[in-house]
């Protein structure tokens, strides 16, 4: 740290320390600002605020770079799998063969849910949104495994390996069960012989009288989707997980909160919103040009969903990878002409040559094409954001651990600039207008 920033305020100068991250990211340390000056920083939406130091994921939004634990996303997408990448994100290093086998064994061991949890699903009305069920059931894991959810950080950390394997493995089982519940279908239990993605698709699509067997291409497409979503530094849901973790709450409670934050259409819900947008453009017989015109208003309900990103002011590298693998995946699934894909491509071409989008640096984000991949895999629309949650689980877990194991952890507690009424006296009912 060096004291090389100076803030001049009300005629007085205050030196402020600066910091530089391992990739050259610069920050001004304002932790003592209020005590020194009486001022706080105002940064609605936190676009300029570093809430923590973190060693998990690096993003350079201007250059379109994403790395997990130092490894470029392009290399992981080509050579790794979701489960191996989950291990990397959580433990910091790629596993050797023995570690990878042990991790796989743990995930297999924890794939079924506690039998008593079946009754929790029964309590939800038919048609319940699977994100609501997912969040509630993830939180309830703390009731079934109280020794892993003590809310005493050192004890929860001591059992972290078991708790994290339970979260990664069971999120997929709960997700599939919530889908079957929402459709009034009987539950299909996991098979220990199946790898992670194949097992999920089995629980989603098998019937009691007939197993669903997926092709290697389908399993690979799902693996890629999950791997690309595995972490994305301080996004809305991860910051939520860290916020909850900062109070000393257990892993299950923290990731359940992450699911709620992910649900909204400006975050994980965007993949579903993209498909809804494409379907409505298709239904109206628009080739996309009318929609692009109205999207230039930038208003909610008119925005080009799947475009723009708080951090990427360039093509989202995950969108590039999904787009590049798209044709192969569709061909392997036997899908030749998808009218929604044709509209998506036209929208992208139009937006990338439109001054409104160019001047605001709005490029496709991961959600622009990921919904189309999910749709091609047969995943129902209301499960898209759940799929994102399954993918994001390793990131949430790694961030929970980073917060829990930080000996200098402070509870997250931002301040505000109050703009409400100044002090006034209580008015008796009979005197009110
Ligand atoms: N379509 C049209 N205009 C847009 C869009 C869009 N998708 N996104 C941003 N803009 C415009 C805004 O209206 C604003 O214009 P102005 O300067 O004239 O007022 C400008 O671009 C900046 O927009 P902000 O909302 O300030 O950008 P912010 O960084 O806060 O928002 C966000 C990022 C939420 C992702 C936004 O781009 C958006 O709503 N995109 C669509 C939803 C989406 O795809 N979300 C997924 C994000 S990725 C993820 O969570 C995995």
Image (cartoon, rainbow, N blue to C red):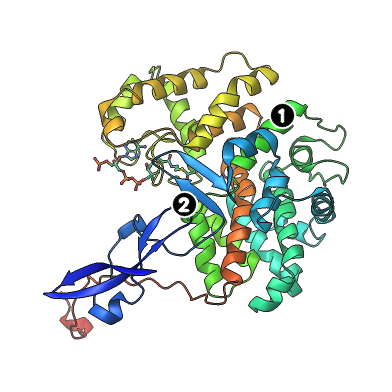
171 and 155: which one is in front? 155
282 and 99: which one is in front? 99
Numbered mark located on residue 310 in the image: none
Residue that appears at 48% across and 17% down: 342
Element class at badge 1: helix
Which residue is disc 1 drawn over?
A: 218
Report the residue that reaches farthest toward the left: 11
Q: CA distance from mark 2 to mark 1?
A: 36 Å
Task: Answer above or below: position of 255 versus 30.
Answer: above
Residue that appears at 26% across and 35% down: 297
Task: Answer above or below: position of 202 versus 415.
Answer: above
Q: Earlier in the sequence, mark 2 or mark 1?
A: 2
For the C terminus, give its image quadrant: bottom left
Residue that appears at 39% across and 21% down: 349
Element class at badge 2: loop
For the N terminus, give its image quadrant: bottom left
Which residue is disc 2 drawn over?
A: 23
Asked if residue 133 shows in the view, the reply is no
Asked if residue 82 shows in the view, the reply is yes
Quadrant for ligand 1? Answer: top left
Q: Position of residue 323 (x, y in %)?
A: 54, 26
Answer few, some or many: residues within 10 Å of disc 2's Cα (few below 14, many 20 plus, some between 14 and 19): few
Answer few, some or many: residues within 10 Å of disc 1's Cα (few below 14, many 20 plus, some between 14 and 19): many
Q: Position of residue 96 (x, y in %)?
A: 79, 50
């Amino acid at each position: 740290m060096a004291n090389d920033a100076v803030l001049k305020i009300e005629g007085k100068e205050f030196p402020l320390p600066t910091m530089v991250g391992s990739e050259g990211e610069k920050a001004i340390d304002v932790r003592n600002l209020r005590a020194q000056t009486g001022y706080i920083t105002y940064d609605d939406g936190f676009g300029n605020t570093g809430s923590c130091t973190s060693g998990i994921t690096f993003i350079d939004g201007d250059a379109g770079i994403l790395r997990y634990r130092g490894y470029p996303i392009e290399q992981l997408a080509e050579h790794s799998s979701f489960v191996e990448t989950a291990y990397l994100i959580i433990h910091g290093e790629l596993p050797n063969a023995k570690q990878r086998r042990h991790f796989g064994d743990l995930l297999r061991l924890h794939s079924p849910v506690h039998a008593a949890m079946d009754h929790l699903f029964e309590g939800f009305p038919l048609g319940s949104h699977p994100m609501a069920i997912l969040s509630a059931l993830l939180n309830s894991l703390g009731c079934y495994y109280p020794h892993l959810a003590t809310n005493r950080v050192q004890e929860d950390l001591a059992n972290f390996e078991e708790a994290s394997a339970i979260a990664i493995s069971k999120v997929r089982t709960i997700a599939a069960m919530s889908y079957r519940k929402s459709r009034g279908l009987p539950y299909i239990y996991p098979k220990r012989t199946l790898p992670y993605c194949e097992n999920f698709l089995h629980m989603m699509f098998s019937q009691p009288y007939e197993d669903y067997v997926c092709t290697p291409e389908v399993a690979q497409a799902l693996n890629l989707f999950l791997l690309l979503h595995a972490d994305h530094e301080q996004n809305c849901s991860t910051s939520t997980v860290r916020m909850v973790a900062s109070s000393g709450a257990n892993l299950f409670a923290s990731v359940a909160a992450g699911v709620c934050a992910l649900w909204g259409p400006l975050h994980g819900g965007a993949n579903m919103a993209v498909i809804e947008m494409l379907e409505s453009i298709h239904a109206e017989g628009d080739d996309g040009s009318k929609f692009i015109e109205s999207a230039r208003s930038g208003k909610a309900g008119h925005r080009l969903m799947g475009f723009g990103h708080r951090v990427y002011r360039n093509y989202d590298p995950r969108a590039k990878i999904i787009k590049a693998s798209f044709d192969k995946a569709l061909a392997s699934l036997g899908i030749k002409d998808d009218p929604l894909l044709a509209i998506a491509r036209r929208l992208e071409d139009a937006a990338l040559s439109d001054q409104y989008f160019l001047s605001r640096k709005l490029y496709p984000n991961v959600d622009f094409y990921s919904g189309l991949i999910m749709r091609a895999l047969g995943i129902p629309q209301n499960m898209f954001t759940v799929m994102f949650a399954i993918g994001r689980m390793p990131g949430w877990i790694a961030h929970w651990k980073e917060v829990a194991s930080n000996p200098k952890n402070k509870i997250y507690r931002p301040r505000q600039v109050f703009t409400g009424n100044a002090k006034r006296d209580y008015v008796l009912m009979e005197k009110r207008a």
